[in-house]
Amino acid sequence: MTFRPLSRWRNGSSTCWTTLGSAKDGFYGDGSACVIMQLIFVLLLFFMFPATARAQASFSLSMPVACELGKTCWLVNYPDTDRTENSAKDFTCGPLSYDTHDGTDFGIRDLVAMKTGVPVRAAAAGTVARYRDGVADRMPSKDDIKTMLAAKKGCGNGVVLDHRNGWQTLYCHMKKNSLAVKAGQAVKQGDQLGLVGHSGIAEFPHLHFAVFKDGNVIDPFSGQGLDKPCGTIREILWSPPLAYEPVSIYAAGFQSGTPSIEHLSIDASSPDTLHRGNSAALVFWIMIYGAAAGDRIHLDIIGPGDAVVVRRDTVQDKTRARQFYYVGQKFGEALAPPGHYTGVVTLSRTDTDGKTLSRTREVNVTVR
């Protein structure tokens, strides 16, 4: 989904920014000496720092979500650098995007995490230009999507920040009634804007974060517009840089019945213990961000005595932002034997250049 920052938002007052060496900031005095000192200062900056560092210093971003990447949140989709219709590539030429996507999606585990509260923070100092609140957090139906598109509310609850020199940042899908700012309010980098939510056109709780320069979308991972080809980086706007993770097994667990994506989207936690009286079956499930066509997924349940209880091998049929698999064993009236069980998933991938990657995750449960 492509979101523009100026559609039916509440307007705030404009903000004037002072320039280097102005009387307002008090850094220099008035008169010709001020001009000379400004020139000396600018020349020093120019020769002391390389071009990339100077460009980064002009506008740098901190992470807009208060979470730990790879543990409590994940980078799910990146801006689409492929202008071809019905085709998408992220800045590495990988598949972590979708057609016309103009931002970066920071996903969280489930609705339990959303209800607990994951703060959204200003990625850079600025002024609130637009905001919207009051849109419900829910999975939108097809009719909901049509209605929101017609009303230009696909972003759901969100904020637009104005920054210096034509830069803007956009924060979408925030939690209903969580916004902590108003139009015209000045914010510092790291100030809380609200909470990650599931409002607008969103399939799962996440923050959609977009960057604009003079109204044009900029990929913060490359510092370039989306009309530039993937695989090239002009500058990285993130400070510190955010690691690119091509695929993540973001949740895994056990239960005694058949899992559903609907239930796991609500609560993707896993118990430490299952009661044998309720264990006519034992099921190991996993959830993936960034599954790519051709990925090989291997699942095992290993039981007491390191015996393999059941296993499953499958090949991913198509690229998906989220994917869900499970494997299980029915025990019937005999119930699952008591003891310690381990679920192991391994995802293997070979790209077009022959490079391979592998991701493994283990989860333990005790049947009593």
Image (cartoon, rainbow, N blue to C red):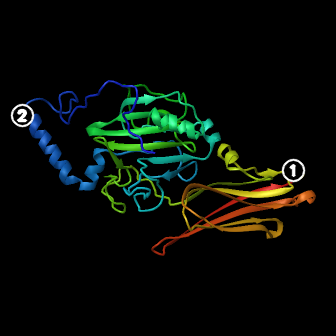
Q: Which residue is mark 2?
A: 32
On the rendered structure, is 53 left or right of 197?
left
Q: Nearer the viewer, mark 1 or mark 2?
A: 1
Callout 1: helix, strand or loop? helix
Q: Say few, some or many: other residues with alpha carbon within 10 Å of mark 2 (under 14 / 14 to 19 / 20 or more).
A: few
On the rendered structure, is 203 left or right of 33?
right
- Looking at the image, which is closer to me, 289 or 240? 289
On the rendered structure, is 44 left or right of 134?
left
Compared with residue 275, is residue 137 higher up or lower down, i.e. above or below?
A: above
For image coordinates 30% across by 49% down, the residue present is 56
Compared with residue 146, is residue 344 higher up or lower down, i.e. above or below?
A: below
Identify the residue at the far right of this view: 333
Q: Position of residue 326 (x, y in %)?
A: 71, 59
Which quarter shows the C terminus?
Answer: bottom right
The CA distance from mark 1 to mark 2 is 84 Å
Residue 278 shows which numbered tag?
Answer: 1
Q: Position of residue 161 (x, y in %)?
A: 37, 34
For image coordinates 30% across by 57% down, the residue present is 234
Compared with residue 326, is residue 178 higher up or lower down, i.e. above or below?
A: above
Identify the residue at the far bottom of this view: 354
Compared with residue 258, is residue 300 higher up or lower down, i.e. above or below?
A: below
Q: Is residue 198 visible?
A: no
Q: Amino acid at mark 2?
A: Ser
Callout 2: helix, strand or loop? helix
Residue 303 shows which numbered tag?
Answer: none
